[in-house]
């Protein structure tokens, strides 16, 4: 079996093929891309850890909601988070189509919008920079669900707007900090075992 991690860049889609957009498979040589498929997905404008494999069971083992495998995301956002908002994020927020599960929020740094200009998407930079002294922050959020746009929707629910989002880890597997965006490497046997062990622990707990 083949197991790879890719530091997915922003601007490409998580798909094997797309008629319009560049895909995550375009970063691999053809002979490898033909064998691999992405496990789960990251939005087009989200970067970070993505696993690719030829193991057809891996999606089931780590991406199904009942497995409760954690995913940690780092992000920059506009707005503020007080203790009340933090509790909402961590205890669950009712959405139109589901209620979020328990989560863990960690504030990393408070700053001003102007301090984060380099991380803003070009198409929205002018809009955000109209209020350069407005509040912004860097934070991390760990969730065990995987609904579409979930992290962004959770922050929007408390009045904040994410403009940079990066997945840092899946279960015990962390993104290799030596990988630049668009770079990949094969997982070690120990890293594959991390994923498998996490799955076994959750199965025993059910």
Image (cartoon, grey):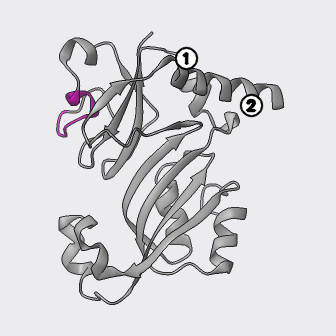
- Residue 151 on image: x %, y %: 51, 58
**Residue 17 in the image: above or below residue 104:** above
Classify mark 2: helix, strand or loop: helix
Mark identifier at residue 57:
1
Classify mark 1: helix, strand or loop: loop
Residue 135, picture quadrant? bottom left
Q: Residue at x 40, y 35 (%)?
A: 50
5 horizontally vs 126: left or right = right
Q: In which quadrant of the rendered image does the C terminus lie?
A: top right
**Quick one: which residue is furthest to the right in this view?**
205
Residue 93 visible in the picture:
no
Pointers 2 and 1 in contact (C-beta within 8 Å): no
Part of the protein shown in magenta: 19-27
**Residue 153 in the image: above or below residue 78:** above
Q: CA distance from mark 2 to mark 1?
A: 16 Å
Label 2 CA crowd tier, 10 Å (few <14, some 14–19, many 20+): some
Q: Residue at x 23, y 48 (%)?
A: 11
Q: In which quadrant of the rendered image does the N terminus lie?
A: top left
**Residue 54 in the image: above or below residue 171:** above
Residue 202, picture quadrant? top right
Residue identified by numbered label 2: 202
Residue 103, picture quadrant? bottom right
- Residue 170 on image: x %, y %: 54, 39
First in sequence, mark 2 or 1: give its number: 1
Q: Residue at x 44, y 74 (%)?
A: 137
**Residue 188 in the image: above or below residue 104:** above
Residue 31 visible in the picture:
yes
**Quick one: which residue is furthest to the front in this view?**
178
203 horizontally vs 191: left or right = right
Instruction: Return the residue nearer the eye: 87 or 111.
Output: 111
Instruction: Return the residue nearer the eye: 23 or 111.
Output: 111
- Residue 70 on image: x %, y %: 61, 43
């Amino acid at each position: 079996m083949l197991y790879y991690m890719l530091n997915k860049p922003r601007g490409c889609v998580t798909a094997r093929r797309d008629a319009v957009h560049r895909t995550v498979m375009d970063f691999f040589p053809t002979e490898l891309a033909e064998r691999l498929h992405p496990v789960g997905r990251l939005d087009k404008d989200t970067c970070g850890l993505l696993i690719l494999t030829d193991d057809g069971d891996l999606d089931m083992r780590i991406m199904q909601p009942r497995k409760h495998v954690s995913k940690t995301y780092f992000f920059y956002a506009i707005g503020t988070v007080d203790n009340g908002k933090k509790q909402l994020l961590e205890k669950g927020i009712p959405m139109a189509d589901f209620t979020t599960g328990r989560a863990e929020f960690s504030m990393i740094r408070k700053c001003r919008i102007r301090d984060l200009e380099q991380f803003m998407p070009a198409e929205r930079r002018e809009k955000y920079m109209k209020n350069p002294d407005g509040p912004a922050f860097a934070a991390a959020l760990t969730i065990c669900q995987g609904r579409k746009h979930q992290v962004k929707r959770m922050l929007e629910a408390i009045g904040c707007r994410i403009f940079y989002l990066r997945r840092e880890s899946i279960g015990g597997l962390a993104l290799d900090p030596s990988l630049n965006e668009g770079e990949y490497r094969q997982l070690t046997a120990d890293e594959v075992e991390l994923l498998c062990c996490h799955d076994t622990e959750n199965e025993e707990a059910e």
